[in-house]
Image (tube, coloured by chain):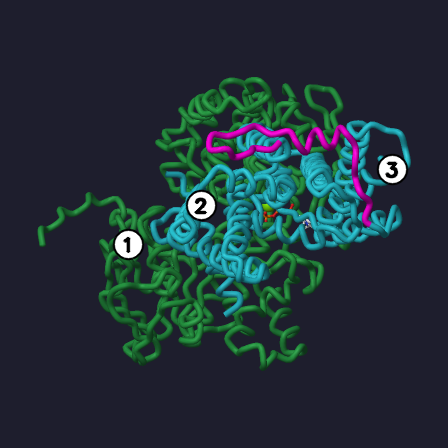
Chain colours: A cyan, B green
Amino acid sequence: MNARLLPFVVTCGIFVLAYGLAWLQFPAILSTRVIGNLLTDNAYLGIVAVGMTVVILSGGIDLSVGAVIAFSGVFIGVMLRDTGLHPYAVFVLLLLITTLFGLAMGAVIHLLEMPPFIVTLAGMFMARGAAYVLSIDSIPIRHPAIEAIQSAYWLMPGKGRLTLIAGLMLLTVAAVTLLIHRSPFGTRVMAVGGDARTARLLGVDVGRTTVAVYGLSGFCAGLAGVVFAVYTSAGYSLATVGTELDAIAAVVIGGTLLTGGSGFVPGTLVGVLIMGLIQTYIVFDGTLSSWWTKIVIGMLLFGFVALQKGLVQLRSRKGGGRRRARRQSAQGRAAA
Amino acid sequence: MDAVLEARGITKRFPGTVALDAVDFTLARGEVHALLGENGAGKSTLIKCLTGAYARDGGTVLLDGRPVAPRSTADAQALGIGTVYQEVNLLPNLTVAENLMLGREPRRLGLTDRRGAGREAARLLADYDLDIDVTRPLDAYSVAVQQIVAIARAVSLSDKVLILDEPTASLDAAEVERLFGILRRLRGRGLAIVFISHFLDQVYAIADRLTVLRNGRNVGGGPAAGVDRLALVNMMLGHDLAQAETGHRARAPDDGPPAAQFRDFGRSGRVEPFDLTIRKGEIVGLAGLLGSGRTEMAEAIFGIDGSDSGTAEVGGTARRLDSPRAAIRAGMGFCPEDRKTDGIVADLGVRENMMLALQARRGWTRPVARREQDRMVADYIRRLDIRTPHAEKRVGELSGGNQQKVILARWLLMNPGFLILDEPTRGIDVGAHAEIIRVIEELCDRGMSLLVISSELDELAAYSDRVIVMRDRRQVAELAGAAVSTGAIVAAIAAAPQQRTAP
Ligand SMILES: Nc1ncnc2c1ncn2[C@@H]1O[C@H](COP(=O)(O)OP(=O)(O)OP(=O)(O)O)[C@@H](O)[C@H]1O
Ligand SMILES: [Mg+2]
């Protein structure tokens, strides 16, 4: 088996195991109803985490996405309230804005050679600020077209509902999986994340790849914003604070290396589902504080980083991945 | 002469340095053209200016008589110029096939046609006798295989010009021969090839013409047959090479206490258990082909992989060498082979890089006084002839060979009781070779013990008191005293494997 897929397989194993344990305690948890809700409740997180996966694979980070989602909600609310535009037109306009916003951040990162952490942190403040400027209050989002989206679903066997927004999330995962793991663009992203200098000397247009990656993340954040607005029927500038960190956690739990160049997009979906499952368990239990979600996720994150380190070491013992192991030992030596 | 590539007056300035000063360079169709010069002479910079990796500050480049100005390596590839840059090989996190096909993947419906890419990649490698699975990640293979894959990629990209910057640094003799066979065939087809190397034997074996750079200037060249070795070295250095010591280093055998002693020491799967005793002031050479277990043995001794059998004694006390930290604490040092991944901290300056090991041994609470640092660093910059404008220059901006010297200096100035050097002179020019050997011998005369791994057998024979020959992860021979000679080492490496005696 490809050792690179091992973190993904382990993630899937953990998900199945956790679901199994929850099922022993609450048999009702194993139903398409619960699964449908799991997908719907986490649709926006899944979409934004997939965009984050691409950014992390390219060796970067995008801290602006939570704020962009909040901006999206406020933007949609204000536009529907103050203009006669049809929601679909508003959505297209919004996606255009967030994509351009991502492209601009990518351009700054590449052209000014600034660290993505700083640039997207600035982007986070700007997007959040723009949301405040549009409105400080929570704006209800109502429109027949949006109600139609909210009530569109496919009835799964067992009466579970696969809602339109959950389907949109699954579609995004599938499309980005193809883009990253089956297209020439995806190979470039991996190349840049592996070693940007070498990639450049091999003829990869690092600038264009970087800009495109942040553009894609901006698009995903906008799409997540649309889904979140539809899901909550409201736009609020204080919403989704810290969602970028949830997304990063999902990416890491999904088996993508934070240093870039190695990972698997569907892993992120499983990461999101693990986080959603913990939440669902807490709801079923009824006595636990929902803050337990955070604690469990924190422990999982630790576990995964340790697991990945262990895997790398295991591989180096067997002789494979020797260079990487040696690089680590060199760091150890320098730190000694 | 039928010139394919003609460069006139190429100039490149870096802050504080003129790397290239109006260099002319002409490359003819169907020739192998060696580009020579000391470390820091500007060879790699010239290549990067020609292929668009650096923007040049002046000069023109004509390809087939037409001026070209590639702005990126992708442009150069599109013009039919394929390049393997020094120490920048490929991307270890991608598969072999992805590396080979990067930038020209066959597509189907906009997606990569992976089957087609795999087939094409296998075809590109067919000439190289490599039995590897192209769908596996590149870092599953040895550095030598990676190097060959990098060359195969460059060859397949070059319609007109192929440029190889020190391509043979990590290849063994058989692989070099195979590469040369391929280069000769490409030359026969009319490809123009630029070959950069510090191995003069290889240069004379393959090159038709030579060009020598010194301090960023073209100082001469001509048909390889018309320039003899001595003249060539003089041209590179700009002065006569101080007569290198020949013959065996004369030293009385030391029967003092052993500096380090290993019994039945090994690590399963990496190197079989061995016994090794190194006396104070002794130089022990470690010879063998690539993959014979030389590096693995050194790494086991230095605690990089940990050992799983035997005992170690360093400086008279038993030690558990289970990590580099433990080894450093025991007074050992290790200068690794692969400087890009194992040694250099490219963003730190020359001084900081050199001080790392010594400072680590003392602990960060007892910093070495700045004055003392400056003195030591200046001393080694002078002794190893490191070409840098000042001691604070970022190491990443030095030439490849000068980076190697900085790492070497890091371990030499720590002056450990027992030092391991893995290919210390790789990528280092002829002039500096002699210097480095002199410094090594001087340190050993003052009591340091040394274990040196080297593929340059002449050199190994010249300074080693004893030579251990490895094959198949085992010690197969030990030569001592008068028996140490290049011929004897070659014979031991090549000897038919002994029959394994049944346990
Ligand atoms: N990116 C850079 N920034 C600043 N100076 C540089 C940079 N690259 C090279 N130089 C300087 O240019 C000079 C020529 O370096 P170059 O790498 O071309 O040498 P070289 O002939 O290839 O040597 P070697 O045999 O050691 O590889 C050196 O003095 C080096 O310090
Ligand atoms: Mg060079």
Q: Nearer the viewer, mark 3 or mark 2?
A: 2
Where in the figure is residue B456, as x and y percent of width and height?
Answer: 40, 50
The dot on residue B469 is 1
Q: Is residue A100 visible?
A: yes
**Front tag of 2 and 1:** 2
In the rendered image, which quarter is residue A77 located in? top right
- Asked which secondary structure carries label 2, the reply is helix
Q: Nearer the viewer, residue A32 or B312?
A: A32
Camera-near label (1 vs 3) is 3
Tell me the chain of label 3.
Answer: A
Residue A192, which numbered label? none
Q: Residue furthest left?
A: B502
Q: Chain of mark 2?
A: A
Segment tinted magenta in the rendering: A138-163
Rounded to the nearest whole Å, what is the CA distance between mark 1 and mark 3? Answer: 83 Å
Q: Quadrant of the N terminus of chain A?
A: top left
> How far apart are labels 3 and 2 at the CA level?
41 Å
Residue A179 visible in the snapshot:
no
Residue A17 versus residue A153: which sits nearer the camera? Answer: A153
The residue singled out by tag 3 in the image is A81
- Rendered residue at 36%/66% (across/down): B283
**Between discs 3 and 2, the one toward the N terminus:** 2
When the figure is inspected, residue A157 is found, relative to residue B417, above or below; the finding is: above
**Is B122 positioned to the left or the right of A162 in the image?**
left
**Crowd rating for badge 1 (residues with CA inside 10 Å; few <14, some 14–19, many 20+):** many
Pointers 3 and 2 within a single chain: yes
Say which amino acid is labelled 1.
Val
Residue type at mark 2: give it.
Answer: Ala
Residue at coordinates 54% horizontally, 24% vertically from top-left? B112
Residue located beneath label 2 in the image: A28
